[in-house]
Image (cartoon, helix red, strand yellow):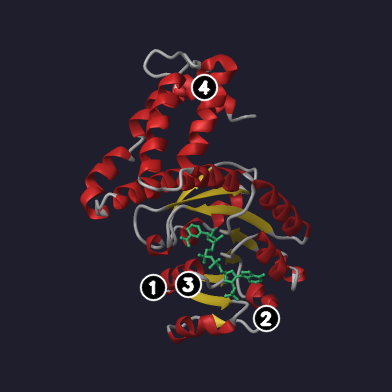
């Protein structure tokens, strides 16, 4: 029932609060110590140094902006990493996650890489999950403490894997959400409020049918255009771009999608399924 949390952005704040709610003895450290004030008032202990924070207990949860921040902190006290499990719930590239895991291991610690899939209000609430990868034994040792934050989706021993899954998800999230925002800008340009289009947006943004239908075909390399095709996508996207242009919108986002499908068409794949893009986008 002891844990250290390093990093008190919105995520670290929510994580510390979840541990305090469950009665954990929580030590915190943050570059800007003032951010710990409300948590200290609730019973958290503010460590005077990184070394003291690392030495406070076996499990250290880190939630920082990126791995540069993680490293800037840990290199202040590498000797205090021996015997520690660092649950590094900071997002960055798989390569950075692997490099930091190696560096931590060289100082006698273990990194569990994590990719949190919920915004701060989801921490400690049912339903949220975090991708984890790295040392399975360390994960089992600290399972109960990690599950205070979210559920666990363990992917394997490679410390880069959780970061990779997280970035794949972020790739889908950012392009999907930008699609929503662009469509909503078009709606708004025509005086249609977001609340008015809400139910239509929720239905349109539900890609489950497509993901389930396409996944086995993508894995089989089967891009048969029996239900959709690239030429149809080009025509449809031209309509989108023209409609957006007529409303005075920036068309960079649908224009980039149109350009990708035109590339597939120019390469002779006009009759193939939309899944052909999984090959075209490889460059
Ligand atoms: P923030 O970017 O707000 O994290 C800020 C934390 O990083 C603060 O503790 C800040 O310290 C510290 N920090 C930044 N740079 C340095 C540095 N050079 N040296 C020391 N400390 C530094 O992020 P969040 O709290 O929102 O998120 C944390 C992680 O969780 C991120 O990797 C994010 O991608 C991931 N995540 C966030 C989600 C969200 O909705 N917020 C959702 C899912 C994942 P200081 O207070 O001193 O500035």
Task: Work out how far the residue at label 3 is from the one at label 4, CA to CA, in angstroms.
Answer: 43 Å
Q: Mark 2 points at which residue?
A: 49
Judged from the image, the secondary structure of the residue bearing numbered disc 2 is: loop
The percent coordinates of residue 127 (x first, y second) are 35, 52
Q: Does the residue labelled 3 lie within 8 Å of ligand 1?
A: yes
Which is in the foreground here, disc 2 or disc 1? 2
- Closer to the N terminus: mark 1 or mark 3? 3
Which residue: 45% across, 19% down?
231
Residues under numbered marks 1 and 4 in contact, where contact means CB atoms less than 8 Å apart: no
Which is in the foreground here, disc 1 or disc 3? 3
Q: Mark 1 points at which residue?
A: 21
- Residue 106 sits in which quadrant? bottom right
Judged from the image, the secondary structure of the residue bearing numbered disc 3 is: helix
Q: Name the residue under label 3.
A: 13
Which residue: 35% across, 34% down?
208
> Which is more toward the observer, 119 or 152?
119
> Which is more toward the observer, 94 or 226?
226
Residues under numbered marks 3 and 4 in contact, where contact means CB atoms less than 8 Å apart: no
Task: Work out how far the residue at label 1 is from the one at label 3, CA to CA, in angstroms.
Answer: 12 Å
Q: Relative to 235, is 57 above or below?
A: below
Q: In this view, does 246 lie to the left or right of 13?
A: left
The quarter of the image holding the C terminus is top right
Residue 276, numbered label: 4
């Amino acid at each position: 029932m002891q844990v250290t949390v390093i990093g008190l952005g919105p995520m670290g704040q929510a994580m510390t609060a979840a541990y305090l709610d469950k009665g954990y003895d929580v030590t915190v450290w943050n570059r800007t110590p003032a951010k710990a004030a409300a948590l200290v008032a609730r019973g958290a202990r503010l460590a005077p140094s990184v070394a003291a924070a690392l030495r406070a207990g076996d499990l250290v949860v880190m939630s920082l902006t990126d791995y540069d921040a993680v490293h800037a902190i840990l290199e202040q006290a590498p000797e205090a990493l021996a015997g520690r499990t660092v649950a590094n719930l900071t997002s960055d590239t798989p390569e950075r996650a692997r490099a930091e895991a190696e560096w931590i291991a060289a100082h006698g610690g273990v990194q569990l890489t994590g990719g949190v899939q919920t915004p701060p209000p989801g921490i400690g609430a049912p339903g949220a999950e975090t991708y984890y990868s790295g040392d399975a034994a360390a994960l089992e040792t600290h399972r109960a403490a990690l599950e205070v934050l979210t559920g666990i989706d363990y992917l394997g021993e490679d410390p880069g894997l959780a970061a990779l899954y997280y970035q794949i998800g972020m790739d889908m999230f950012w392009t999907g959400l930008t699609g929503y925002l662009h469509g909503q800008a078009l709606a708004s340009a025509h005086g249609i409020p977001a609340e008015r289009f809400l139910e239509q947006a929720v239905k349109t943004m539900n890609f489950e049918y497509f993901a389930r239908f396409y996944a086995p075909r993508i894995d089989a390399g089967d891009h048969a255009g029996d239900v959709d095709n690239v030429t149809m996508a080009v025509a449809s996207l031209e309509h989108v771009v023209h409609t957006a242009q007529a409303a005075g919108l920036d068309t960079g986002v649908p224009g980039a999608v149109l350009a990708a499908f035109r590339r597939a068409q120019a390469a002779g794949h006009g009759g193939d399924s939309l899944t052909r893009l999984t090959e075209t986008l490889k460059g």
